[in-house]
Image: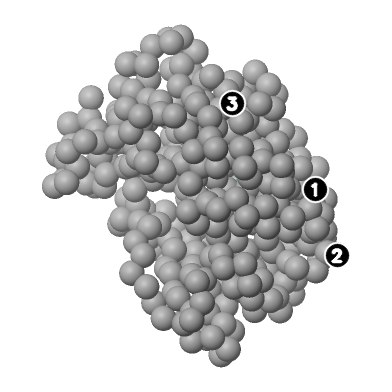
Amino acid sequence: MNANVKPQGATDTQLVDKHGRVIDYVRLSVTDRCDFRCVYCMSEDMTFLPRQQVLSLEEIYQVAKAFTELGVKKIRLTGGEPLVRNNVMSLVENIGSLPGLEELLLTTNGSQLEKLAGPLKDAGVTRINISLDSLDADRFRNMTRTGKLDKVKRGIEAAVATGFDAIRLNSVILRGRNDHEILDLLEYAMGLGINIAYIEEMPLGEVSDHDRLDTMVSNEEVMAVIGERYPLTPIDMTTAGPSRYYRIESTDTKVGFISPVSHNFCDTCNRVRVTVEGRLLLCLGNEHSMDLRRVIRENPGNDEILKAHIVEAMDLKPKRHYFYDKDEPQLVRFMNMTGG
Ligand code: SAM
Ligand code: SF4
């Protein structure tokens, strides 16, 4: 078991890494598949994992249960597109009922939300992030390669009507593509009374569509565009992640800037990820990992052995990540494999 000293306040979690960081947030990827092929996330021709390599819904639940028993309070379901996995709602309901879990979050492209927003709330999902990069139907189609804007907008509006604790749009801004829509996207969020986060493109996976160094728009640039029309007031909203939040006076909308490339947020990192292959990734930008699928399949039904491995894996969590440093190779893992 992990012999690391627990920092103050870490009484009810057993997950503490070598650098004293408490891990109480897990992002679980429930599928690598998706109905979209966003240009920054996937290549046009993707090969998805064979079924045998993918954790079953029961195995994903076993992982979620083990983490909550180790003190994890917050789980985010992501992918791939989590809502396209068969029977995913049974998994959401089961995870939503886990004792000790305080927040169940979801990141989705919105394509299934029109029919699933209500059932997701009933299953215990508290907050939803919905990706939206363009309000122009042709450009939306172009950036997602397959997506239909109308359907996604109906999904977003269904989520708003359902009344989650918070809804946030996620927009990846690419130069020459949607960088002139920064204000339109913000005003759409303001009109619905929901939040928006601008995400810098990360170098995850080799994409066929563009050279990322040409298209990456820094959040400083996005912030400058917004600041010209809407003064931004910083708010103290700690997420222990790469986001900084601002308020726009006399609106309900908070604006987040997620800057994994230009800002280092590793000191306060409280999270790990589990891929749909059961690989426990200790850091978004590094390959340090543990194969939980092997542990589960070699020890069927044994939660204690699984938990012992998770505790042990905390020692592998690196101090920080580097994306574009010269001596480090660019990662080959795609975002849909990583669990965004
Ligand atoms: N399919 C869901 C969706 O699109 O919201 C969940 C998975 S997706 C991988 C999660 C988030 O990662 C999305 O908001 C997407 O825009 C973002 N994303 C994907 N590839 C990215 C990249 N290379 N850089 C930055 N963000 C990326
Ligand atoms: Fe699918 Fe989300 Fe990746 Fe787009 S960002 S291809 S919706 S997994």
Q: Earlier in the sequence, mark 3 or mark 1?
A: 1
For the residue labelled by badge 1, is the local secondary structure a helix, a strand or a loop? loop
Q: Residue at x 63, y 45 (%)?
A: 117
Q: CA distance from mark 2 to mark 1?
A: 17 Å
Q: Secondary structure at mark 2?
A: helix
Q: What colour scheme has been applied to the protein in the rendered image? A: one colour
Task: Give the amino acid at mark 2.
Answer: Asp
Q: Please tell me in which quadrant of the rendered image residue 3 appears.
A: top left
Ligand 2 within 8 Å, label 1 CB: no
| Quadrant assignment, res 216 | bottom right
Number of other residues with Cα within 10 Å of mark 3, as a class: few under 14, some 14 to 19, many 20 or more = some
Q: Give the residue displayed 76% in from the left and 42% down from the top.
A: 35
**What residue sits right under mark 2 in the picture?**
138
Side of 141 where 295 appears, left or right: left
Count of marks overlaid on the render? 3
Amino acid type, callout 3: Ser
Quadrant of the snapshot with the N terminus: top left
For the residues carrying marks 2 and 1, which lies nearer the camera in this image?
A: 2
Nearer to the camera, 41 or 120: 120
Picture disc at residue 44: 1
Q: Give the numbered dot on residue 90.
A: 3
Q: Secondary structure at mark 3?
A: helix
Nearer the observer, disc 3 or disc 1? 3
Few, some or many C-alpha atoms within 10 Å of disc 2 (few <14, some 14-19, many ≥20)? some
Rendered location of residue 25, percent (x, y)? 38, 43
